Image (cartoon, helix red, strand yellow):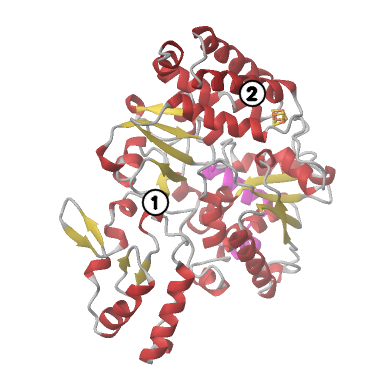
């Protein structure tokens, strides 16, 4: 709808003769999907939700011409029983801390000047004029930034490994193959702030000694692809990609490679094979990509959100970054909230925020006052977390200790009406479809687990089947080649652990 609304504004502003006085910008995602389409009027920052083409005339005549904000389109505060005027007053935003999403919804992603006006490319300029590659890596290590794609590996160490591999040719890859059901964090960054990723990749290129980067992005994200091509073109025009960046002898360029929709291509070795033109299948590690990656050369792979954090570390310092979040997991994490929650959307919170705060304070709780049942974090690789653990501060270690994982940031909320056996079956069905078939435990084992789950859901299962699911799940985790197989049983194992009674009810209640 946003494009239609923008067109209606253009027509109305022309009609009123004020088009040249009002800047109209189509931005990226604001995060609050539930209230979209959203419009913010500056300088007073009035936040309008659920805007339609039919509202355009009123906004122009009342707000823009007469200075009277339209109450009807403001968000309701059910507690204070008043209308909320500005974004910052919404609880949804006030508990968030935006680093990776800092420019999303704030700038026009198609205009490099707007990124530059927000200190864009300043970190790259500072690094090239003042810092050695080693100092850059030290700063990233000092910041404590960990990979946001799911693994949580320290980013600075990864860069150091790639730097210490001796080769004239090295590569930087941005993994934008976001494939978890319900996850759209990377998409929002690429659509809303593509230059932050380009700048970070150039910084990484300088640090590890690479002149070429690739963004491996899902072809199912056409807007992100279009905006990335546009941003790369603008950065080249401004001399921020290509030869002699900032007048130095540093050269770095970026190209796109489109993924064809295989979930397993989010695994870095499969992704590399796919860029090389082969079928996207993981290979065993070692050798790690930092030693032998794309076309056999040292390669550093980070995901979109990880890169989006990097310029801030250099603009505000590693100490600033470390001051946010927890000692072991500094910084923030972006989550996509979906399922049975009032404020579906995209949120970014400091590590250490509790799950309860995310679900109830920011997410607005469960619709129709139903009872919360569980959250699935980490998508098909993760597990479910129940009410008793809602006060756990979010970080990599804590979620793993609960038998789930951070993953890339999908959070699906379930209420009392959700059948957890069915939830487990949904995720396993997904991984069975997405298994590349290279190794037997994952290819055959997950299929066997799915057959058993189908049997249980059809009312034909037995108590022994539940034990068999656990036995198979543990075996598949231990023996699969890559992360997909090693984590595929997690949704089943964790729902059996927390909701065994639901499995038992399926196999004992045959009525
Ligand atoms: Fe392929 Fe699954 Fe084996 Fe990974 S674990 S290599 S996805 S078959």
**Residue at 59% over, 18% down:** 473
Residue 184 coordinates in the image, percent (x, y): 52, 49
Position above or below: 465 against 167 = above
Q: Is the magenta stretch mostly helix, strand or loop?
A: helix
- Is 138 placed left or right of 405 in the picture? right
Position above or below: 470 against 250 = above
- Is 194 placed left or right of 209 in the picture? left
**Residue at 27% over, 67% down:** 73
Q: Which quadrant of the structure image shows residue 138?
A: top right
Residue 459 coordinates in the image, percent (x, y): 48, 17
Q: Is the CB of mark 2 within 8 Å of ligand 1?
A: yes
Q: Which of 436 and 26 is in front in this view?
A: 436
Q: What stretch is highlighted in magenta?
A: 123-145
Residue 369 coordinates in the image, percent (x, y): 25, 39
- Is 246 placed left or right of 511 in the picture? right
Can residue 42 be seen here? The reply is no
What's the mark number on residue 97? Answer: 1
The quadrant in which the N terminus is found is: bottom left
Give the foreground label among 2 and 1.
2
Q: Which residue is the site of mark 2?
A: 446
Q: Residues within 10 Å of mark 1 (few under 14, many from 20)?
A: many
Residue 113 coordinates in the image, percent (x, y): 55, 74
Determine the CA span between mark 2 and mark 1: 39 Å
**Residue at 55% over, 33% down:** 380
Position above or below: 501 against 335 = above
Q: Which of 443 and 140 is in front in this view?
A: 443
- Is 246 placed left or right of 33 in the picture? right
Instruction: Kindly state the secondary structure of the residue where label 2 is placed.
Output: helix
Q: Ligand 1, what quadrant?
A: top right
Q: Does the magenta stretch include residue 413?
A: no
What's the mark number on residue 418? Answer: none
């Amino acid at each position: 709808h946003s494009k239609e609304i923008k067109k209606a504004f253009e027509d109305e502003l022309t009609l009123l003769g004020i088009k040249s006085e009002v800047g109209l910008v189509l931005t990226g995602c604001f995060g609050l999907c539930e209230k979209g389409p959203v419009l913010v009027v500056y300088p007073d920052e009035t936040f309008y939700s659920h805007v339609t083409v039919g509202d355009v005339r009123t906004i122009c005549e009342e707000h823009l011409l007469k200075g009277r904000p339209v109450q009807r389109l403001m968000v309701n505060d059910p507690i204070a029983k008043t209308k909320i005027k500005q974004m910052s007053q919404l609880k949804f935003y006030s508990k968030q801390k935006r680093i990776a999403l800092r420019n999303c919804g704030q700038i026009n992603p198609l205009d490099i000047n707007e990124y530059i006006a927000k200190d864009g490319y300043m970190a790259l300029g500072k690094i090239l004029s003042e810092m050695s590659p080693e100092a850059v890596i030290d700063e990233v290590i000092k910041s404590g930034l960990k990979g946001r794609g799911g693994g949580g590996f320290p980013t600075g160490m990864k860069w150091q490994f790639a730097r210490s591999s001796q080769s004239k040719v090295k590569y930087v890859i941005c993994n934008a193959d976001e494939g978890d059901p319900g996850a759209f964090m990377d998409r929002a960054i690429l659509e809303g702030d593509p230059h932050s990723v380009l700048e970070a990749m150039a910084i990484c290129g300088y640090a590890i000694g690479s002149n070429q980067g690739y963004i491996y992005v899902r072809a199912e994200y056409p807007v992100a692809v279009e905006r990335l091509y546009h941003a790369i073109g603008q950065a080249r025009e401004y001399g921020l990609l290509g030869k002699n960046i900032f007048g130095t002898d540093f050269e770095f360029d970026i190209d796109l490679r489109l993924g064809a929709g295989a979930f397993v291509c989010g695994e870095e070795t499969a992704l590399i094979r796919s860029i090389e033109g082969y079928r996207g299948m993981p290979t065993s590690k070692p050798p790690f990509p930092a030693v032998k990656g794309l076309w056999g050369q040292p390669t550093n792979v980070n995901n979109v959100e990880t890169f989006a954090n990097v310029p801030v570390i250099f603009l505000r310092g590693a100490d600033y970054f470390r001051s946010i979040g927890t000692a072991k997991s500094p910084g923030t994490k972006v989550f996509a909230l979906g399922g049975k929650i009032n404020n579906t959307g995209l949120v970014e919170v400091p590590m250490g925020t509790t799950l309860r705060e995310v679900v109830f304070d920011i997410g607005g709780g469960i619709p129709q006052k139903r009872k919360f049942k569980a959250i699935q974090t980490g998508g098909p690789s993760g597990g479910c977390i129940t009410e008793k653990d809602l006060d756990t501060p979010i970080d990599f270690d804590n979620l793993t200790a609960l038998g789930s994982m951070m993953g890339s940031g999908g959070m699906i909320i379930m209420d009392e009406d959700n059948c957890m056996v069915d939830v487990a079956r949904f995720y396993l069905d997904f991984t069975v479809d997405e298994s590349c078939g290279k190794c037997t435990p994952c290819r055959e084992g997950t299929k066997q687990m799915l057959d058993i789950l189908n049997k249980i859901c059809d009312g034909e299962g037995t108590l022994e089947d539940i034990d068999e699911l656990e036995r198979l799940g543990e075996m598949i985790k231990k023996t699969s080649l890559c992360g997909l197989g090693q984590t595929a049983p997690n949704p089943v194992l964790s729902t059996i652990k927390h909701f065994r009674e639901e499995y038992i009810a399926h196999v004992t209640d045959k009525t």
